[in-house]
Image (cartoon, grey):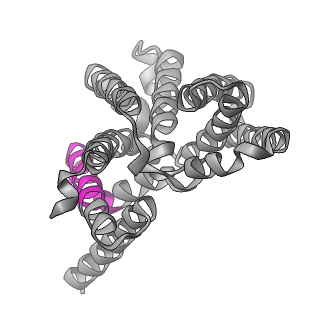
Amino acid sequence: MDIFAEYFFQRALIGGILIGIMAPLLGVFLVLRRLSMIGDTLAHVSIAGVALGFLLGVYPLAVGLLFSIVAAFAIERLRRAYRTYAELSIAIIMSGGVALATFLFTLGKGFNMDVTSYLFGSIYTLSWTDLWLVLGVTVVVLAMLTVFFKEMFLIMFDEDAAAVSGIPLRALNLLTTVLTALVIGVAIKIVGALLVSALITIPVACSLAVAKSFRHSVWIAALYSETAVIAGLIAAGVWNWAPGATVVLLLIVLLVATLLVRGAKRS
């Protein structure tokens, strides 16, 4: 197909594959710790950073990434302040992110159309600078998950036992949140802030329906994600569909199919 010869599609495919591998791998830890909504929260804050980047004439994706990391630190700080109501920190930061983004939109109405691409994704406009940034974040995320896999696994199932065993609970909680911020920060241009959490959660939901162990679920989640990303981007390129939306809708189709097959086997 001619579309594979286009450089913009090649960059889109590479960027999608990179996000497709790191998002669900990190998503497994987030979902099992009941932190699924943190993706939406950091995505809204990232959009505020993107808007500020346009206002200041600075590389928007970098400013969005910075905002996302700052929000990650704020979430961890609030989680410690409200230990009994840990989810309250996510709600507070999300509200602040939406409010700040809206405020910045009103300050520069001329760049609203540009910001729209970050809301709904614009993977075909990925530059080589964007791609190198995505690659760098992918390397960092995969390296951290590999090095601290055992510790994060223990924290995920029993924080108290992990703390007693000497695992630096606070540092690893912060690491998890910052890694999530990095993934969200670079993914918003690929699938958009409104859809980015889908790549973190839906492949995990698929894998949990069929996996027989935790390690098994990690790799199955990545397989589902990459299948949807590659097939979705090719379909979107051939039939001129919205790429981010196509990938997410394909993930939902895979989830429904997985649940139907599982149900049929049990009956």
Residue furthest left as drawn: 1
Residue 106 location in percent, x, y? 84, 44
Q: Residue at x 18, y 61 (%)?
A: 2
Of residue 149 and residue 116, the one placed in the foreground of this image is 116
Q: Is residue 71 above or below residue 14?
A: above
In the figure, residue 101 lies in which quadrant? Answer: top right
Of residue 129 and residue 80, the one placed in the foreground of this image is 129
Q: Is residue 230 above or below residue 219?
A: below
Q: Residue at x 37, y 32 (%)?
A: 134
In this picture, which residue range is highlighted in magenta? 206-230
Q: Would residue 209 be seen by someone viewing this image from the given angle?
A: no
Q: Residue at x 35, y 31 (%)?
A: 128
Residue 129 location in percent, x, y? 39, 27
Q: Would residue 17 be seen by someone viewing this image from the given angle?
A: yes
As for residue 174 lying within the magenta part, the answer is no
Residue 198 location in percent, x, y? 46, 56
